[in-house]
Amino acid sequence: MPEQALADLSVLDISQQAAGPFCTKLLAGLGAKVIKIESPRGGDPARFEGPFFQDQPGIENSGLFLFLNTNKRSLSLDITKPEGKRIFRQLAETADVVVESLTPGTMEDLGLSYSALASLNPGLVLTSITPFGQTGPYAGFAATHLTLDAMAGLTYLRGDLNRQPLYPGGFIGDCAGGLAGFVGTLTALLERDRSGLGQQVDISILEVLLHYAENYLILYPWQGIVPNREFWPSSATGFLSCRDGYERVSTVVGRNSDLSLLVERPELLDEKFGTAIGRTKHLEELEAVLQSWLAEHDKREIFESAQERRLPFGYVATAEDLVSDPQNIARKFFIEADHPIVGKAKYPGPPFRMSETPWQSTTAAPLLGQHTAEILSEFLGYTCQDLARLREDDVI
Amino acid sequence: MTSEQPLAGLRVLDLSTAWAGPLAGRLLSDFGAEVIKIECCQRPDIIRYERMAEGKADGKPWERSWWCILNRGRFGITLNLTKEPAKEIFLKLVALSDVVIENYSPRVMKNFGLHYEVLQRVNPRVIMISMSAYGQTGPYRDYIGYGATIEPVAGLSHLAGYHDGPPLQLDSSIGDPSCAFFGAGALLAALHHRNSTGRGQHVDLSEAESVMQLIGSEIMDFTLNGRSPMRKGNRHRRMAPHNCYRCRGEDEWVAIAVESDEQWLALCRVMDRWDLATDERYAEETHRWQNQDILDKEIEAWAIQRDRSMAMESLQAAGIAAGPLLQNRELFEDPHLRARGYWQIVEQPELGRRPFPTTSLKLSRTPGSIQRRAPTLGEHNHYILRGLLGLPDEVILQLREEEIIGEVPVPNPVPEIVPVSAWQERGAVAHFDLNYRQRLGLV
């Protein structure tokens, strides 16, 4: 049985919501042993976020939580209590990574600063994922994906000029932060492979989002241009409606004849549509011509016909489309896992495939505190009586 | 004692073009990897032609701004891999390298005879990552996709937009930069594994599959409940109010997200609206969610009288998540980013001093850094071919004569760039500052 790439690593995860947990989901998927530490009352607040299984709110029913926390074990532990802190420190002595997302300063207040943890375990990597990072005038400010998207210069660029600008929805920004935490953690671990020493990885979700805005940020210091929501790439016309949904139509330099053949409209051969400038100037007219053909065809059919002619279209897939998409089916992208409460369900599979070290098979997210007894006896030799006492004291 | 950079001593061959591959390479070069970009004079990286730099470099339209940003930190050579001598040189480099990054269509490396099985025979330790639109296998494997066309197929675009409008054009691509991070992560994981086994491997990264991870929770609504989420503007599943509100000034906005009932009361206090604070219709989150159109109007009435930065300050002081919608130029002047040292001035030949993003991965003991500026086309041909591989001058001369290597694109139509005036005509430019250099302290 081939081993996983990170099978030798153990991770203590006290992060909450989406960013930190997405980071540790990726580490767990590559084989790291992730212990998710949740507060005994309620657990990770992400358990209270929808979509809920059968629209029933419940701490084991959250679709967000189920997606983010595959392949992890749950230890319910109150690390604000002295006994909880002691247990955490003991676990940290032999862990490779700790991931946290607390407001900057909180770990210090708990006596769990990087230097405190490093003195217990010099090889420990502490990954801290927060909206603005550990330092700077905004460190500790309240934020959500919506507000960070705005402050990264992204929201301003999206939507109609005369309506409120838009963020892209869901938890995209948070996951981007978690993904950066994943890369930062692995970078620090590679350094540790060499030096034996750990360090702190400080991720600011705002800074990560700036990478996503780069192609628009650079318009200013290189040309003095501040674009608004009307600005978009010259090589594409955007989303046009078709018979059963929407298609992303891409016009490509020098390929107008292929486009014209695809949509059976010889008027597209007119030289005014032949250049990027021309297409920008005559955008509405171009779209109208395309629209008339698209209205008679379905999105997947359009996608496949266009791609056969090497035109880079993209069809707008709904969640349902993703599950029935021929590529996802052929690649077996969706993977079924069983969960004690929601039962068998399909989950999105790995983000990439490795030839020697396959992704861990998917185990569903843990119930709150599901592995508490197992972990405390495995790592610290706790007996049933010990656990009963801890439960009475509300530590676990 | 200065610590060595995490990836010092690692050599990466970067065959990739556009955004995702080169950004993955940059994430590695920022931490000390030696990245050698391998281009081809017959088809230089398309990014070289993107985003003009005002004034300069029109004589060399292949040394433009986005190239400089994305491809900093690496050496650059050219090799026409369709020719046998170039393939031999490439394999010699593979023997001396740790990582190969490529983002060609899946059949291309095979057609070159340079696919993973061949590379592995030359160097069993080499780790190769193939970053493609839809993956190395399956019915879409030969389909062409860019970040902006993969996002809809991966389900992102459907979820973004006004509730009564079409899918949103996510102008700044989400697909490509996330794919870059996934790619870098995969390489680092493979390197970690190689440290204990000595073996390399092949990574198959489909941008679509990696990007679907970002909307995992929305996909679960279908896999759990048989229902596809629909776009809903700035609305959140749970939080309300949650939107962007127009402030005083021209096209100025503040984003506000109320995460809890306590924050709702705090917002009412800031807005001096006791009537709303005591109105039972809004006390509970679910009720606020149902009535958010009404609440949005109340907040708009407050926000429109205020400067967006003042709005943010008073809301943050009350513990509410709020932030102004910034424009690109404001990010270079932002006090927080300056305090964090996010921007660094780098000098490019002929293009002068410009602010570059450093890194969003802040490692405390071995921080990342910009190793060097982006290479001009084929800038290090001699350095690598002679210096690293020891090829004699006559051989290098021959390669140049056969146009296998070079420093200038072999005649190719220069991709057309839409000039600023065309954007201005469409009303797509909020500001056009001729004095931007002074404003940013570049002169």
Image (tube, grey):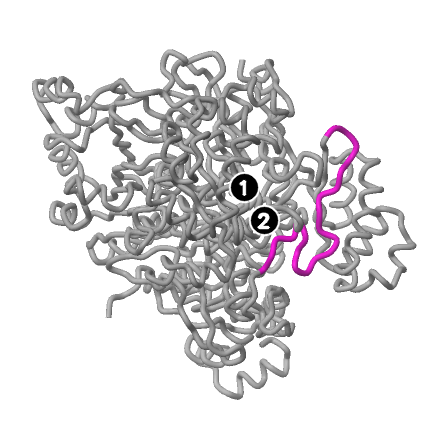
Residue at point 46%, 72% (across, down): A364
Residue type at the position of mark 2? Ala
The image shows residue B14 at horizontal and vertical percentages of 28, 37
Residue type at the position of mark 1? Leu
Badge 2 vs badge 1, beta-carbon distance below 8 Å: yes
Question: Does the segment drawn in magenta span residue B243?
Answer: yes
The image shows residue B362 at horizontal and vertical percentages of 48, 42
Please report, as a chain letter, where disc 1 is located: B
Give the structural element (helix, strand or loop) at label 1: loop
User: Does residue A129 show up?
Assistant: no
Please provide the residue range marked out in magenta: B229-250
Residue A18 vs B392, above or below: the answer is below
Please report, as a chain letter, where disc 2 is located: B
Taking the image as shown, residue A97 lies to the left or right of residue B119, namely right
Q: Nearer the viewer, residue B59 or B267?
A: B59
Q: Which residue is mark 2?
A: B160
Taking the image as shown, residue B373 lies to the left or right of residue A83, namely left
**Mark seen at residue B170:** 1
Residue at point 61%, 53% (across, down): B231
Which of marks 1 and 2 precedes in the sequence?
2
